[in-house]
Amino acid sequence: MMKNNATKPDWLSKLEQESWQAELIVSGVAIFGSLQLPGLLERIGEFAMTFFSLENFTMLYLFFNYAFIAVYVIIIGFVLHFVLRALWIGLIGLNSVFPEGINVEGGYYPRHFMEKIVRDFPNENGLINGLDNFCSVIFAFCSYAVLVFVALNMDVVAVYAIGKLLGQFLPENLLLQVRNIAVFAFISLALSSTLFSIKQFKETKYARRFQYPFFRLLTKIAFHIFYRPINRLSLTFLSNLNLRQYFSWTLGFFFLVMFFAIANLVNSNLVFAANSELLFDRYARTDIIYSENYDNLRKPGIGRLLSASIESDRITGSTMRVFIPVFKNEEEIMKSRCGDWAAPDSLKGRAAREWERQHYFECLEKYHRFYVNDSLYTAQLQRLEDENQGESGILTYLPTANFREGQNLLKIEKVENEVDSVYRTMNIPFWFYPASSTGGKINKPADAPSND
């Protein structure tokens, strides 16, 4: 067995003994900060869904999935660490007040009972030392797990960027072959490294020659700038802990983390990044009302609007206010309908900007169609910025003269290319009860008592 003969500096030994102080500070800050992260991640994710094209939604889903897992590793891990470290401090304080621990002569219970208690809970520092070690391990493990998921997110972005870059130069079939070869090579490295760790192959000449180079190459590719800290932490755990216990605790911890991370992801709009069709299908439904589609029902602090919105679920006036968000990732769809609105080279400065604004606005008019109960409306549009959470889009007011009393359906179509193919449909059910029909009052049932 090899030993490290390097002498540990006194300052490092002292720092190790007092590391709990730094752990508590970092843990407290991490808990406070991490509790804000799920909401922040959701806002960033919703913005990304409106910025990147639909073909990139899989990348977004993986990125934010790993990000949510990392956040809940921080929240759960550091809350657990903080609670146990606080318990450890409490035990130390109690030990200083009552250095003898449990007193068999005192208390409510008889001596024979207290003697049995002391056998089960001996007056020693084992619990304090065990908690101290366990807290330090939790702190290190959480840091290790967060680094792993940050590295995986960087891998997702890198693979996406490389794929986009190669796609500019390689035909699609050749790009697919390159991707398959890269995936096969990476999986082969991973399987080979795992195979050499099996008992039957550990000491073979092939393991001695190839296992470490394969491991080094694999982890450098996967963890890149985090190669050293991740491997240092991981190998310290693997070489000092019982493997069965280590993997059991790791799996249990990650099942708990995954439960909260997936629950948060499923309850957010980011779940639609897994399948963009689900997003369009959700807001095309006519059998359900979504509160975010109505200004009067929308909850405070809701995320970005991903569909159209009207003023209320019950319309009473002569016009109905309608806002439709227009996202950055719709520009290519709009250009398929209208062509590019870039100003000609002959125009410069303000004239060029005004030309582009005018043609962009004309494209917005061609891109949107408005129906109420299947009747097409010619809408007068106006661009609007910062409707809810910084969305930009278009605003219009539809006349209600031809609405039927009772339930109605607003349908908005976003139309692509010149053959009028519908890119997206948004449906919003609402009720129309004009004030003039009831004198501005709600009709009472026939058997309702009169106030006269």
Image (spheres, helix red, strand yellow):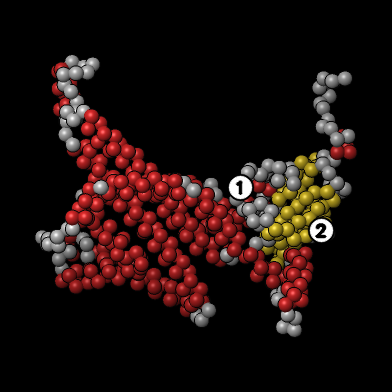
Tags 2 and 1 in contact by the CB under 8 Å rule?
Answer: no
Query: Percent from the top left, x then y, of residue 443?
Result: 83, 30
Q: Amino acid at mark 2?
A: Ala
Does residue 425 appear in the picture of this structure?
A: no
CA gap, disc 2 and disc 1: 28 Å
Q: Residue at x 82, y 39 (%)?
A: 433
Question: What quarter of the picture does the N terminus occupy?
Answer: bottom left
Which residue is label 2 attached to? 379
Seen in the picture, residue 220 relative to 103 is either above or below; the reply is below
Residue 353 marker: none
Q: Amino acid at mark 1?
A: Ile
Left or right: 206 in relation to 144: left
Mark 2 / mark 1, whichever is N-terminal: 1
> For residue 323, what is the image quadrant?
bottom right
Q: Residue at x 70, y 46 (%)?
A: 294
> For residue 334, what is the image quadrant?
bottom right
Closer mark to the observer between disc 2 and disc 1: 1
Query: Percent from the top left, x then y, of residue 336?
Result: 69, 72
Q: Residue at x 30, y 61 (%)?
A: 229
Query: Percent from the top left, x then y, of residue 148?
Result: 36, 59
Left or right: 173 in relation to 114: right
Which residue is label 1 attached to? 302
Residue ranking furthest to the left: 1
Residue ranking furthest to the front: 11
Query: Percent from the top left, x then y, of residue 350?
Result: 75, 75
Q: Residues within 10 Å of mark 2 (few under 14, many from 20)?
A: some
Q: Residue at x 38, y 43 (%)?
A: 79
256 or 144: which is nearer to us?
144
Does residue 198 appear in the picture of this structure?
A: yes
> For residue 7, what is the image quadrant?
bottom left
Seen in the picture, residue 3 relative to 167 is either above or below; the reply is above
Residue ranking furthest to the bottom: 346
